[in-house]
Image (cartoon, helix red, strand yellow):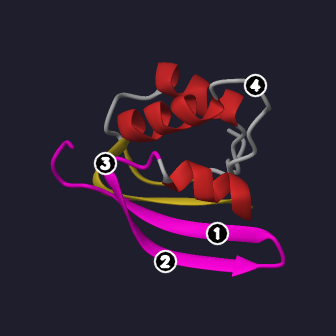
């Protein structure tokens, strides 16, 4: 069998595909960059996947353009911000999924 990386960066399409391949609440952590496509419902899909795949208390690490991450955080119901770093127009955030549903 071929060795698979422990950490793999996923685009939104691959993140959405994971919902069909993994049971709900099966991930302890997720690294998912946020690069929205204009005039789509990327933000809703991103949060739907994260809420469904992550266990309560799990960590989500995401990065993208500062403005995109700012808008993403405005809809982060069910997650709270742990760490936030900005540099040269790029922002990286670490969030934790709430233990109880919001």
Lower sequence index among marks 2 and 1: 2
Lower sequence index among marks 3 and 1: 3
| Relative height, residue 2 to residue 71 (above, below) | above
Residue at the spot x=50%, y=68% of the render?
94
Q: Main secondary structure of the magenta part?
A: strand
Residue 10 placed where, x, y %?
A: 69, 43
Residue 85 placed where, x, y %?
A: 62, 79
**Residue on which disc 1 sits:** 92
Q: Nearer the viewer, residue 7 or 69?
A: 69
Crowding around mark 4 (Cα neighbors within 10 Å: few <14, some 14 to 19, many 20+) is: few
Give the SS element for disc 2.
strand
* Residue 10 appears left or right of 54: right
Q: Mark 3, mark 4: which one is toward the viewer?
A: 4
Crowding around mark 3 (Cα neighbors within 10 Å: few <14, some 14 to 19, many 20+) is: some
Mark 2 near mark 1, Cβ–Cβ under 8 Å? yes
Residue 24 placed where, x, y %?
A: 33, 30
Q: CA distance from mark 3 to mark 4?
A: 24 Å
The magenta segment: 75-102
Give the SS element for disc 1.
strand
**Residue on which disc 3 sits:** 78
Q: CA distance from mark 1 to mark 4?
A: 23 Å
Q: CA distance from mark 3 to mark 1?
A: 18 Å
Residue at the spot x=49%, y=51% of the render?
74
Q: Which mark is residue 83?
A: 2
Q: Mark 2, mark 4: which one is toward the viewer?
A: 4
């Amino acid at each position: 069998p071929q060795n698979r990386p422990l950490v793999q960066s996923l685009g939104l399409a691959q993140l959405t595909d994971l919902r069909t391949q993994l049971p709900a609440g099966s991930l302890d952590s997720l690294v998912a960059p946020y690069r929205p496509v204009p005039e789509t419902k990327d933000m809703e899909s991103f949060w739907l996947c994260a809420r469904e795949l992550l266990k309560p208390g799990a960590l989500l690490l995401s990065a993208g353009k500062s403005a995109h991450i700012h808008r993403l955080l405005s809809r982060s119901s069910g997650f709270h911000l742990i760490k936030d770093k900005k540099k040269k127009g790029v922002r990286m955030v670490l969030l934790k999924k709430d233990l109880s549903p919001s």
